[in-house]
Image: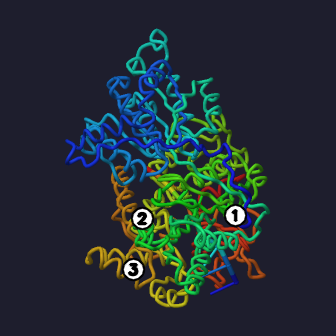
Amino acid sequence: MKGFATPLQPADIDPRKRRRFSTPGNPSLNGPQSQCIQAQRAGLPIAMGKDALIEEIRKNDVSILVGETGSGKTTQVPQYLLDSGLAGQGMIAITQPRKVAATSLAARVATEQNVSVGALVGYSVRFDEASSDETRIKYVTDGMLVRELLGDPLLSRYSVVIVDEAHERTLRTDLLITNLKDIQRKRNLPSDAKGKGSVAKLNPLKIVIMSATLDADKFSNFFGGARVTYIQGRQYPVTIYHTTVSQPDYVEAAMRTFWQIHMDQPPGDVLIFLPGQEDIEGVDRSIKLFADRSPRELPSIVVCPMYAALPSSQQAKIFTPAPPGFRKCILATNIAETSITIPGIKYVIDTGKCKEKRYVARDSGTGFDTLLTRDITKSSAMQRAGRAGREGEGFCFRLYTEEAFDAMRESAEPEIRRCSLTSSMLQLRCLDQDLEELDFMDKPDQEAIGAALKTLYLLGALDRKRNLTKLGRDMAMFPLEPNLARAVVASREFGCTLEILDIVSVLSASSKPFFDSSDEREAASEIRRKFRHRSGDHMTMLNVMRSYQEIAASEKKSGRKDWCRKQFLNERCLAEAQEIRDQLREVCSRMQIDWHASCGEDEQPVLKCLVRGLVQHAAYLQPDGSYKQLMGPSIVKIHPSSSLCDKKVAAIIYDELVYTTHIYARGVSAVPRGYIAEVPILNIKGT
DNA sequence: GAGCACTGC
């Protein structure tokens, strides 16, 4: 094809032919469904090495399993361990970075075991659990197991912990691996050294780390040279093309490549990886524009955008097959790289770009996040290409040169090196551990540690000697960022827990309450005006939440959706916020905090609570009309999406800073300066 | 006067 070098089949994509495993056909004709499932299990690549694998895990405290896509390791290894009796009386936990993976894997394995989910095979993720006394195999999110540590520091219910997708190196996976190493040391002491007490009764812990190829040695070294076992996968060959020259305008290059495929290549759907929503919307428009003018004899095109913030009804489109004679073109962020698998993809176009969030730590603790477009890593590039070979032979067009590929980083920097550590630090202090002294695969940055310590001190969670306070222990009970947890704990004192929980729930939901599609911005802001509160965005959010709750109480789901659409509100965010709110109310009840306590229409107590949590996110108006951070050197602007944009008030607090064209404060409320000055911690001498 | 990678408790 034009612009691309001769096809390459570099070693990074395994071109081994995928062997078709024989399916017994229609189960209703060929006998019980379970026979069919068992035949499939036996046909998996991993099944051939089953006995050797069990023996390997039996012999070693720690095993590293490297499995390619489609090897079946995630579903089979737990069952092998259970069948072989290796787990003894304890449970087998398998951790996943994502909730959807944990729940769907549990369903699959339950089917294979011919039990219903929640019996022998279960799962546990936030807001959703299916397990019972019978449960022996449990799929959990890594965050869930980290939280379980707080109540059971030795994870004594589990005899095997399998850490899956360990190569993704999420902050929670890293925390877990560090803790598992320590727990194993404590639990696997020789019996004469254990002495008396509860530790002596504990069964030993087995650890299985499952990872992609690149990082296996690193995991092995961390566990003192643990053995690495390789499991073959199943993948059709993917032919990879690189461009001959670099493509500065990757959007234009993606368009050109798509049309080349569409005009010259046989049927098959196309997946284009783009960095973000903005590019996706742009390409979407252009393809539709050109499609209208393209020759009649060409197949028609169905364009499907795909990114996390897209309403789920539109996300569902990518799973419906294109009608006969149509070619589907999916425009996706890296949500399609790991989180979801889209059927029918034959061609992948890889721009080689992604967006990466990075926390810029500051000694003052007032850091901020940046979100910048950058080059992907080699492991991402391989993953993207692999998406073309799930169901048959595929093709991947990389919009960068082979030299550019060689120059890419091997894999992404682990999260522990680039995220705020405040939340993890608080959790670890609850376990009497010190983030600075722990044995991590990659040590966190000193500046990030300093910022986290400072933040926890200013929130009152740590005292001046870095000891955990009663307040800190209370804060850690809440599944919230420490600054929001601080506001909740403060609400006990100010009698406005009902209001604070509503606000905090929206803030910690995974999406934003207000939709912001560029074409309808004017209409949206007009309709939203009725929610507006003069003090700013936090009370405005409370008004939204209150209105939604009234609707939710009287309307069915469709009515709620309808209402939200008319108000330009994101129903997914508000529904999730309600779920979070209910969970937080439960936590409050357990802690004897009366969540019914309300301040009615008086916003003053609410703002005072928020100031306690957002004390590092405060800025004062300067004589020249700009806002300067109270702690930290920056001049900040109020984000144009805020209801306080263009307003001049003496002092503001804000949820977050985002650095784009300026340093913008988002989620802003006006507060009297006196509220900030009266925060107790600021009045201790020498701080 | 502007921009939203992806997760998790």
Residue at the disc numbered 2: A319
Amino acid type, label 1 = Leu
**Which label's residue is closer to the chain start, 3 or 2?**
2
Asked whether residue A368 is in view, the answer is no
Residue A614 figure quarter: bottom right
Letter of the chain that mark 3 sits on in the rendering: A
Q: Residue drawn 57% across and 40% down?
A: A212
Dot 3 and dot 2 residues touching (CB under 8 Å): no
Position of the N terminus of chain A by quadrant: bottom right
Residue at the disc numbered 3: A564
Question: Foreground residue, A283 or A269?
Answer: A269
Q: Can you tell which of label 1 and label 2 is closer to the viewer?
A: 2
**Which label's residue is closer to the chain start, 1 or 2?**
2
Q: How crowded is mark 3: few (under 14 residues within 10 Å), some or many (20 or more)?
A: some
Q: What element carries label 1?
A: strand
Q: Residue drawn 71% across and 60% down?
A: A374
Q: Is mark 3 on a helix, strand or loop?
A: helix
Where residue A423 sits in the image (x, y, percent)? Answer: 56, 50
Letter of the chain that mark 1 sits on in the rendering: A
Amino acid type, label 2 = Phe
Where residue A9 sits in the image (x, y, percent)? Answer: 66, 48
Relative to residue A113, is residue A422 drawn left or right?
right
Instruction: Respond whether the residues carrying marks 3 and 1 are from the same subunit.
Output: yes
Question: Foreground residue, A163 or A433?
Answer: A163
**Which label's residue is closer to the chain start, 3 or 1?**
1
Residue at the disc numbered 1: A372
